[in-house]
Image: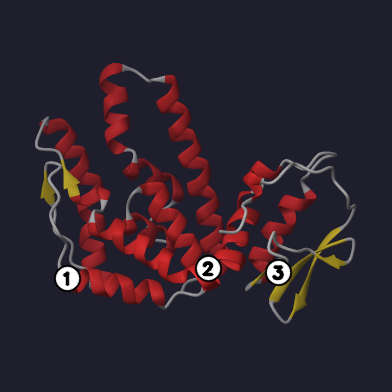
């Protein structure tokens, strides 16, 4: 697997100017007029100027020492460019796996107040997937696994395979982040905002916090998910609708 920015040693800033220019690969990010490269040596380019501008903005925002962990869009672009071409099937398989065990299809049997929250948040999304994407999901009461309809699993696989590398990498990251392919698709297709998607994915944890108070670790995780979700919203908006 290609290295992400988080796994690389933080270098000192070695450039002054950042811009975007059209190339054969799309819209490339340039540092002092030279095309930037991914960890695998490929051109750091996005399929739309809007997304390339976001990536370039991350490079412009760096201080004397480059804070690689802050460059979330650049990291996802590395995945789309370095990992997706050869690793498409693995990404597709994981998206399908999350759909087959989708978080928002598993409803609590008790307490009633939690079930009511889940139904209010999740049922409209399950209905949307059916009405807009022809994906029929089966709701489950409790935590015992139940297979989703085979036609739905096949449709998710076909849908994921048809995505370009950048949207595939985004959906792959979203499904992992939320534990839900439905939420990932809803964010990709602008059915949900980042904040609403993150809240839906963390509904159970937020319910527990309301009952017992906010745990510091859980609070940090919720904030981290919110930041990643906001990045993904920017990512998909910059790419445009599939």
Q: Which residue is drawn at 68% across and 76% down?
A: 26
Mark 1 lies on a secondary structure that is helix
- Disc 2 to disc 3, C-alpha distance: 13 Å
First in residue order: circle 1 vs circle 2: 2
Against 172, is 103 above or below? Answer: above
Q: Mark 3 points at which residue?
A: 42
Q: Can residue 240 be seen in this view?
A: no
- Disc 1 to disc 3, C-alpha distance: 38 Å
Q: Determine crowd level at label 1: few under 14, some 14-19, many 20+ residues with C-alpha closer than 10 A.
A: few
Q: Please identify the quadrant where the N terminus is shown.
A: bottom right
Name the side, left or right, on which 88 lies relative to 34: left
First in residue order: circle 2 vs circle 3: 3
Residue 222: image location, x then y, percent: 43, 34
Which residue is outermost to the front?
1
Which image quadrant is residue 146 in?
A: bottom left
Name the side, left or right, on which 225 lies relative to 40: left
Which mark is on residue 37? none
Residue 215: image location, x then y, percent: 39, 20
Q: Determine crowd level at label 3: few under 14, some 14-19, many 20+ residues with C-alpha closer than 10 A.
A: some
Mark 3 lies on a secondary structure that is loop
Q: Is residue 71 visible?
A: yes
Which image quadrant is residue 172 in?
A: bottom left
Q: Determine crowd level at label 2: few under 14, some 14-19, many 20+ residues with C-alpha closer than 10 A.
A: many
Q: Residue at x 78, y 63 (%)?
A: 36
Residue 144: image location, x then y, percent: 12, 45
Mark 2 lies on a secondary structure that is helix
Q: Residue at x 36, y 60 (%)?
A: 94
Q: Mark 1 points at which residue?
A: 150
Q: Mark 2 points at which residue?
A: 84
Against 58, is 38 above or below? Answer: below
Q: Which residue is drawn at 29% across and 23% down?
A: 210
């Amino acid at each position: 697997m290609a290295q992400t920015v988080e796994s690389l040693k933080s270098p000192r800033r070695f450039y002054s100017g950042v811009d975007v220019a059209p190339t054969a690969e799309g819209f490339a990010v340039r540092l002092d007029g030279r095309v930037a490269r991914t960890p695998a040596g490929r051109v750091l380019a996005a399929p739309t100027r809007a997304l390339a501008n976001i990536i370039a903005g991350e490079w412009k925002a760096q201080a004397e020492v480059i804070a690689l962990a802050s460059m979330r869009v650049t990291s996802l672009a590395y995945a789309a460019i370095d990992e997706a071409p050869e690793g498409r099937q693995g990404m597709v398989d994981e998206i399908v796996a999350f759909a087959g065990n989708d978080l928002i299809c598993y409803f609590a049997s008790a307490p009633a107040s939690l079930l009511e929250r889940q139904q209010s948040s999740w049922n409209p999304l399950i209905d949307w997937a059916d009405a807009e994407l022809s994906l029929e999901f089966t709701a489950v009461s409790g935590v015992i696994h139940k297979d989703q309809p085979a036609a739905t699993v096949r449709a998710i696989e076909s849908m994921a395979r048809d995505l370009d590398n950048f949207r595939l990498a985004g959906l792959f990251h979203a499904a992992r982040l939320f534990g839900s392919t439905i939420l990932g698709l809803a964010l990709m297709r602008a059915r949900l905002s980042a904040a609403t998607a993150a809240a839906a994915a963390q509904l159970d944890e937020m319910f527990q916090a309301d009952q017992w108070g906010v745990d510091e670790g859980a609070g940090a995780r919720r904030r981290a998910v919110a930041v990643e979700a906001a990045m993904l919203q920017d990512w998909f908006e910059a790419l445009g609708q599939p």
